[in-house]
Structure formats: C-alpha cells, structure tokens
Amino acid sequence: MTAITSARGKTEVVSARRTESHDIPDIINLIHSSTKHTFGRVNVTYLLEKSNLAVTLSNEKKEAIAHALFLDYPNWNITDQSDWESFLHENYTNNKCTPLNTLFLHLFVARDEYAAGCSQEIVRTIFNVVPELQFVLLFILPNAISLLLLTDLSFTDPALGNIFEEMTAVPGCTMDPNFTLLACHRHQYCPQLYVRKARLEDHDDLVPILARHSRTLKEIYGDYFLVDLLETQDEENQAVVGEDGGTAVGFMSLCSTVNISLLHECFDLGPFHGLCKPHPDDILKMPLEPNFQEVISCLLLLQQDAVAVPHTELPLDDVRGKDFKFAATPVLETEEEDAFRPVYRGTSNVFCIRLFCIDKQHESRSLDLLHYAFQLFPDKDFCIVLVPHLTPEFHLIQSFVRVVPFCTSTFNHELYLFHRVGLLKSFHIRKATTNDIPGVEKLIKTLSLNESILNDLKMFTVARKDPEGTPVQAFVAETLDQIVGVSVIKDEMDIEYIHTHYNIEDFINFYYHQREEHGHLYHFVLNPIFRHYTKHFLKEILRLAHKSSLYYPIYPQYVEGKFQNPCAHSLTSALHYMVPVRPRRQIVYPLEELGINAPSEQVSKDQLAYALNYTDRKLTLESKVSINTRIVVVGASNVGISFLETLVFCPHLKFNNLTLISVHGLPGKNPPGSNHGRFLINSHCFNDQDYAQMSLCSWVNVVVGKMTGINRAAKYVVVSKGKKVPYDHLVLCTGQQYQVPCPTGAAISKLPTNHEVEEKHQQRCPGEAPSNVFILRDDQDCLEAMHWLQENTVNSEGNVIVYGGTIDVYTTVATLLALGIGGSRIHVVQPPSGSQLTCLNEGAVEGAVAAALAEAGVAVHTGALLAAWDAGDGPGRVTWATFTTNTKLLQLPCSAFFSFANRMVDYETFKAINDACLVYDGRLVINTDFQTNDVSIRAAGPLTKFSNRYFANEWTHSNFNSKEIGFQLAVSMLELLDPTLEPLPEPQKDGDRLIPMYNGCVVKGGVFPGGYHYLHICKPEIPICLDIRRAQPNYGMEIITGEARHGDYFRIHINEYSMVEAITCFSKEPLPVSNYICLYGQHERLLNDLCARWDQKLITDLYSYFREPWCLAIYHDRFIDLKKDVRQILMSSKVRETAAEALSVGPICRIPPHAVVAFVLHMETWPGAAVLAQGKVPC
C-alpha cells in the first residue's frame, strides 16, 4: 500500500491490483475530454479484453480511483502491430526499445485530484511486475500536445507530465508528423542496483533484511554468522551486495564447491549435461533395450564453443495421424533399479547461491546481483540455488529453471538453475524463413518429432497453409544469430466446439475476438536455458500472428503399457505457462424430438476428447504462483481424483510436486466404449471422457505401487519393494474394497447349517487368492477379469459363481451374460443379510431383476455362507465351492469365482495406518477438516469416519458424493497453500462440533440382467427401508410412470418442500444420466408445474416428459448461474418493496408463467412464498 497526496493536501492509501471486468463502469466514469484528446475514443471493454496488462488503484474503501491499460503495440494505428520495432528504429534516435522491454500506454484515467500520484504509482507497479520492462511509450496527437505541453515542451498536466518525456525523431523521418512519441524510463522509478563485493561495513544494513526473511538462521548459526560470511571470502566463497543510494539492500552468498554426485542421484540433470564440462569419456549412450525408455536430444547451449546439452524425452506413438509427444511434467512410476543414468567425467560447471535476501521494494532487481555473480566465476556456466519445498516462490527463482527430481528422491529441497547466457536480452522473435531451416534442424535433430516439426515449418515457408487449407505460421527465437526456439501455429478451425465444450469464457469474452484471432499451437520448442522467456515467446507469437488467443490440446494415449503419458502435438515447454480449461457438462439432446431445432453438428459432434490448455495476451504477463509443497495422494479413488482435479485446474497456481500412489496408476487408460467397467456399479463421478479432458498425467507424478508403510517422523510413504516417497502433506483416500472371502472352515462332513458356523466367521483370508477368484476393485481389475474369462471360460464348460449381496452382483451377472456365458452356468449366491434393507431398496425393481435372472436361467441361492473351496487340477485354482445354508449344504463346481461379500479397508492399508499410530476405530478417524491426529496427514472418503466427539457415527463420507468430498478436501488444502487467499478468521471455540453436511446427490447406475438400464439418484442419507420411509408423515409425494417389468419405470420423489429428492429409472433404453442428475434438487414448479400436471393426469410417461424442449434449459450447465442471478434480482430491496405492495391490495389472479419460474427460485427464503407457491397473488 502507498499513500498518495492530492494537490489540496488530502491523502489516500491506495493498493494496486489487476483490473477486472467489474471495473469497467468505474473506468468509463473517470473518462473526460482530455482523455479523449490523448487516447482518442476508446472502447474500454475491448481494450481491457485485448490488453497485456491492466492496473487499477483502489483506496481503503475499495473504490477505484485510477486505471491504466498497456498493450504491446502502439496506441494509435500508425503502423502494423507486428512491425512497430523497425518503425521506431527508422524514425527515432537512441532508440533501445524492443518487444521484450517495451509496452505502450493505451489508456490512463484517474480522479483529477490524485492523477499525478496515481500515474507514478501505476508506472512503479508495472516496472516491478514486469522485470524485463524498460520503457513505456505513448503516441499523442498535436491537439493533445497543445493540452499537455507549454511552449518550452514541459508538461502542464501533472498526471502525465511527471512520467513522460519526448523522444527525438530522426531528421527527415517519413513518419506522420501529426504524432509525437513520449517515453517513460525504468531508471526513473526502479533504477538498477549498484552491485559490488560485500564488505564487513555492510553488516548493519543487511541484518534487518535477513531478520525479516528468516529467524532460523540466527537460531542455527548464531548471532555472527553474517560476519563469518563477510570475513571468510576467497576464490571459492564470495559475497556480493546490491546497494541503492549507498545503502545495501540485497545480499548474495556464493560458493563454487558443489556436491555434483548428490545432485546426480536426486535430479534429472540430463538436459544440462549433468552440470559438468563436456569430457570425451562421458557415457551418454543408453543400453539398446532400457527399462526406462528415453531418447536423448541435444539442445544447443549458447556458448562460444556451442556445447550440446542433453534433454530427456519419452517417445510416443502417433494418434489419429497427428504427431503427439510427451508434453508436461514427467509421469513418474516406480523406477527400475537398473535404469540407465548418464555418467559425466568432466569438471564441475556450476556455482551455487548459499544465501540470498533482498529488500522487498527492490525484489524486481534481483537479477542485477546475478549479473555480477557470473563475473566472479567466469569459468562456470550454471548457477544453482536449493530451496526448501515449503518456501514460497520468490522473485529471483522466477527466472530460474526448475530441475525435475527423480520420483524416489528423498532430497528435501528443490533445485533451480540458471545459465549465464540466460542473462542476454537480445532474445528476438520473428517469422521463420527458408534460411532458418538448417538452424532449426540443428536445434531439434535428436527430437523424436523432428520430422513433423520440419515438415510443418517447410509447409509454412512454401505454401503458408496445410493441405486442408488452414493457414499456418511459424516463428523462431534467435539470440546472437543462433536459433534457440521454434514454434508453429495454425488457425483454430474448431472454435465452436471449444466454445461449447470448454469453459473458455472463464478467461475471455468471445464477443470481442474475431474468428481469425484464435490460434492453435502445434509445436513449441525452446532451449531450456531460455525457459524464463517462454511467456515472452508466446506474447510475441500472438502479436506477430495477429492472434488474441492460443489453444493447445492434449489427447489421451490409450495403450496398455507401463507408462501412461499424455499426448500432444509436440514437445512443449510452454505448458506450465498456459492454463488448463475445465470442460463443460454437455446436454444429452433428444435429437428426434427437437428436429430442426437440434444443435448444429459442430456443437453436438462426437470426437476424441482432449484436455485443453490456453493462453492469451493478459496471461503472458501474469505469473502463476509456483507451489513446491510435496502433496502425496494415496489411492486413485473418486475422492482422490476429484482432489487432484481441483488443484490442477486452479488457473493462478502451479503445483510442481503432486504425486499419486496407486496400484494401477491413473484411471482412464482404456479407449472409449470399452465395457470393462460394466462389472461394477457406476457412481457417475468420472468417466473415460472426463479423464481425457483432465489429462492429470500432464500434471501429476504417478507412482505405481501399494502403500505398505508411513514414516511420520521422516515424512515419507513406503511403497511396494521398499521405495520411499517423501511428502509434506499426505492425503489418504484409498476407500474400501472388496476382500478375498474367507471360508468359515465348517466341517462339511457334519452337514452344518448357518446357525452352527456363524460365530466362527473370519474377517480376513490369509495368503494369496486362487487364480480364478476375482476381487474387482477398479477398472483395471475388471479389464483383467474380462480378458481371463474370454480366454478360459466363455468357450468352455464350468460354472461362474457370483458371491455377495451388493448391487455389483447384478451388473456383474449382466456383463457375464453379455460376454456369452450361458445363464445356466451362472450361480448367484447371496449371504445372509442382517437387516431388511436390500441393495436396491425398491420392490418393483427387485421383482423385475429377479424375473430377468430367472428368464436368463441364472440360479439364485439365498442365505448361503462360503464354507470351503477346493483346489483341484490346477494349483491355486478353485474347482468346487461349498456353502452352508439354514437347511442344507450347497456344493457347486466352479471355473470362476467373483466375490462381492466383504467390503472393508484393505489389510495392508490398515497395517500401514495402524503402525504409524494414526487413530483407527474401524476406520481412520478424522475431524471436520479432514485432519487425522497428524497435522500433515489428511484423509477422506469411505476409508474414514468422524471422531466420536461429534456423536455422529452413523454419518461417514460413504453417505456423500465422493466428487464433492474430494473438492471440499482440496478447498481445505488450498486454505493452507494458496498465498493469494486472505487468511481465515480464528474459528470459535467448539465451533466444529457439528459435522459438515454436503449437498451433492449420490448416484448409482448400471446395466442389469435383461438389458435393463438402472439409475438411482438420491440425497445423502442414512440408508433406511423405502417402505418405512414412505410411511413417515413428512415423506412428500411420489410420481411413478410405467412398470419395471416392461422396462419403462420412472419414479420421482418430491419431498415436503416440493423439491426433487430422489429419482429411480429402470429402462430398456439407455438413460441420459447427466440430464436426470440436473433434476435433483429442483423445485417441482420449475419442472413445468410437475405436481399440478400429474394431479390433472396430463403426464403418462416421465421419460417423454423430460425429453420435451422446455426441459433443456434445466439441463444446461449454466442454469445454476441463471438461478443465482434471478434470485439476487428478486431479493433486492426494490423487489421486496414492490412485492409487499402487491400483496397488500387487489383481487386474486393467476400469475403469468414466466413469473412462476422466477418466484420459485427464491421460494425458500422470501416471506410470502407460501402464497406464491399456490400460483396466486393479489394484484
């Protein structure tokens, strides 16, 4: 915050922030006649949408008092935006302006009395925000000059006169004489620091700065550690300071002794030649058949001898005829012990920063000290700094390159490095030419996609378009006459699909972007030592190509292999500088009913799903906040995936250390349409398309294995084979899984019954399960079971036993029948149930399912307990299974055994939790903020239960929607990690005595025997028999159409508040599940007066009723936003007064239909709602 004084002596404390769309009315109100003379007539909304940087100053009352908008091309149309650099060089003397160091002021407005101070504060702010910025330019017309200048060319307007000075034109220049160029220089507001070697006299200046940054240094090293650093300087240990006005404001302690071998063990230094000098004995070549497949590509380092630096890649196959490549943070899996690593024999080529601090006001000048540091070590090309994982990102390392650690590294610091040529400012972006092809070929010659990149580059140089006629543009990055980067873009031809399938309007307003301004990023290759110029490269691509937006898709790779990598057009180091875009939920359109009103094919077409990443002009000057905290998630459950999804899609955050530990890695590896998941009931939290549109493997490290231990003191998780995965925050969401059934061991020869063996029932079966016993926990287990059945059972004889009493039994039987296994070979064995509550809890559906099983010839045995199974011909294979019942023994031959009888926490997971001394009481105990008794360990999902102090043992996360649980878990984590969030107030004492109640509906769906499609949507609740619930006086009403046996059954439950509380569908036709989920929680009046129409017998089929066109608005993904907007309007004071007036006088009349919808939206909160609910108001 800064204090600004007006000409009258008034003082305002202002803070700077980025301008938002809600500031537009304030900007317009501040525009006056002199603004139009200086900047012309401007469309504020258009300018804000296209600006690179927009700054607002607001006072303590949150009132906006000044705004400024900056773009990367001139504010008047005096030259093409792609050609202004050469224009300035031709027409002005002493011109050092480049696209890297220059922005143009397109609009400045402020309150008159504070204009002078605001202009200076805004300029100071943008120089701090953009470290490379050196000049702010402004073109003005003669009539503006007459307003701003006196005869001696001094400004009279303090708002601009204090910050700009006129640039001298070249004599005889050809530019329009009506324009004058004004410039504002960085050195007037953020001057470069004077850097020198540190002296003992600097101690008193530096101590307060160090004290503000860290208290632990003094606690660890004593009061005189800084004196020691200043006194013990030699050739290997140096210290430098940056001073401003004779006062030391920054300090850097340097050392050239670095433990290179330790860094080689912990980090992938291949792209930087191991931080060593090249040596003829270096071993860079990999074995012919490596376990960890890599391809070494050489990216040239800009040195005098052009030393090559290896870069590690993963080869991927092409998808749909396009070139795809690994495009993000590596997807790490448990590493093989014999994985190849290069060996470097050369001497060290690096020095390190041991200690760095700088005054907050001078943070943007941090690189000034680095310039001098490289001068002290002329034989070293790299500078590194080690940063603790929990340390927030500071200004200096934003220009450094983060080195990717190996997945099993337990090193407790992040490694950042910088190459000396990264200090060069002669980084030039231009359109590619034919002469650039040899340089590009040299740059990418060892990349696996070099041919594709070269072909697209040649396509641009020859035809400027691809074979389909899409315009193509190519750009190169050049430094010291050497090509260090290349990018190829095309026009985005699928913009309608993107607009309707992705929430792109979270970032742009489509109305202000022409179709040809949308670009598609195909290739982006940049030497890693210039990675800090990535955003500038993207900004220049947009300017030179006359684009406002760039889109980058990542397609899924559907392969069965060890590595599950994302697929993109080519290698791109730009991905972390783009933002992932959330997909939009799509309406399942009844195309036949809509006829000519159906959406266009461009909107409704079916195509391969992909994850979309995006950038535009604003984002190129907006840095993400890097978070290096190591977050380890155990379990790829719906809760875990939802948690990771929420973190990944935070547009302003970049999580560098997200790790998932899972037995089968990330889900979603199988191609669309595969039926492997039909064995298990579907919760409809995520499907394969959702996984493809998230591309979590672009952002999350994956360790394939099983958690076997937790070391809370050292903070690491032990995975299969003893691998250690360190963490700062551990999230446990393994859930509960079906377990191998344990036979009761009853003496079969004595023909026992259930009453005799029930007390001897064991909970856990020791040893491994027989090979033909299937315990299905996830899609990968289902896929393996399906393959085994196709190879061993489908075309052979033998019974398939499905044991259990859960709803998964029915979906599994339906899948077995679909695979071609005869119903007579399938036996459903249901163990005794301890309650009257069944898995379907609906008599009509249960009767239809029983009839379908009987019709298919499936035998159903109820009340049977597994007593024993026999291993016959093959070792470890069940051939007979024996069950006890209430009356007799049941013996069945067996070729395959599916068990759904016992769902609980996995034993290895329980043992790891128990051995770590986490409180476990049947489930892992947590509080209302997901915390266990260890503050670093959180847990969520069916694995957990609330602490007994809440007196709510019947409520667990199992009762709620798993996706919502994962989202709330991420929200609680972001409160700790997101530095942009305001700190929460201290919770009241005993304020968390109530457990949180989540609102999302619980969904179950699947295909049952007989080809029936089943769907049940309900509120989170404690399970209770439906008949008992119906008998309650506050149950509400039911609307039922069709019959379950006929496959047209539809039941909708309206509660006492006229809200949709439950839906059950049982149909022969596939169901539009996403549509029906939207009906949950809606008021019946919103559903076209559902209850009234039912009472009038106007509804005979709910399926056709909810396919009518009026219902499509409710299915729209932004309908909830519409409801909120209407509610806000109706709850305004004006509406309250008008409504109260209307209720006081007049006869009774029917309100119009459009008003019904609006009133229903706020029916629960507005007085008089009961009257309005009847559809009558006084008028």
Image: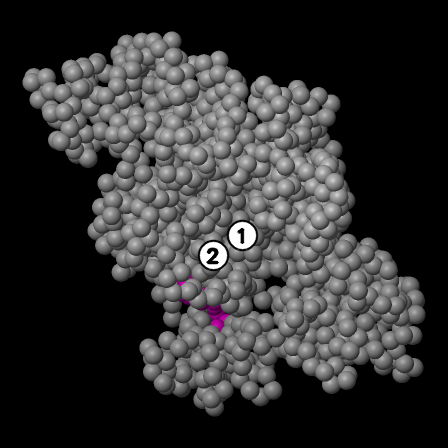
* Kind of residue indicated by mark 1: Cys
The total number of labels drawn is 2
Q: Is residue 7 left or right of residue 313?
A: right
The front one of 539 and 876 is 876
User: Residue 153, how many percent across, how many down?
Assistant: 87, 80
Residue position for label 1: 650
Location of residue 772 by image quarter: top left
Q: Which residues are magenta?
A: 376-390
Residue position for label 2: 974
Say if 953 sits above or below 745 in the image. below
Kind of element beneath mark 2: helix
- What residue is rendered at 61% in x and 65% in y? 424
- What residue is rendered at 38% in x and 36% in y? 562
* Residue sitting farthest toward the bottom: 201
- What residue is rendered at 83% in x and 78% in y? 157
Location of residue 1158 by image quarter: top right
Cβ–Cβ below 8 Å for labels 2 and 1? Answer: yes
User: Residue 1082, how many percent across, how many down?
Assistant: 57, 37
Location of residue 470 by image quarter: top right
Residue 1102: which numbered mark, if any?
none
